[in-house]
Amino acid sequence: MSDPDPKRQMAELEDRIAAARQAQAPKPRGDEHYSAANLAWRMVIELVAGLGIGFGIGYGLDFLFGTQPFLMLVFTLLGLAAGIKTMMRTSAEFSATNAAGETPATREGDRDGD
């Protein structure tokens, strides 16, 4: 028996490795087209959470100090401002991702060829 060609063996090994990687590659999810809707809901939840937390803190401090609507209004407005700031940061993150040519579904290692 003769010694087999090492280049041919290496090429066959590389082909088998590529086939194994492709077989184990994550399959595209069927619900990826909802990614923009998920982002929109995230932004709405951030705004409502800011309002709710501000209202809760203000109401609690009003109850504690007896300054009934004053602190509740102040902290609700601060919560609104915090919620809007968080929404703007999320929007900027999404815009930067889209400017790079990626869709929300292809972020963070979901791309082919990684």
Image (cartoon, helix red, strand yellow):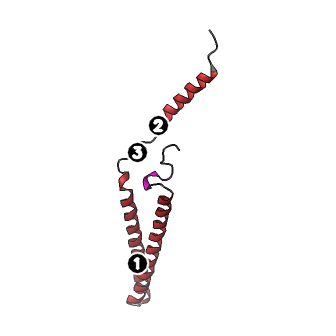
Q: Residues within 10 Å of mark 3 (few under 14, many from 20)?
A: few
* Residue 56 circle label: 1
Give the quadrant of residue 73: bottom left
- Relative to residue 70, is residue 79 depicted above or below? above
Quadrant of the rendering where the N terminus is positioned: top right
Q: Amino acid at mark 2?
A: Gln
Mark 3 vs 1, N-terminal side: 3
Give the number of the mark in front: 3 or 1: 3
Can you name the residue that lies furthest to the bottom here? 67
Give the quadrant of residue 68: bottom left
Can you name the residue that lies furthest to the top here? 1
- Relative to residue 8, is residue 43 depicted above or below? below
* Residue 28 circle label: 3
Where is residue 113 shown, x and y percent of the image?
51, 43
The residue identified by callout 2 is 24
Q: Which residues are magenta?
A: 102-111
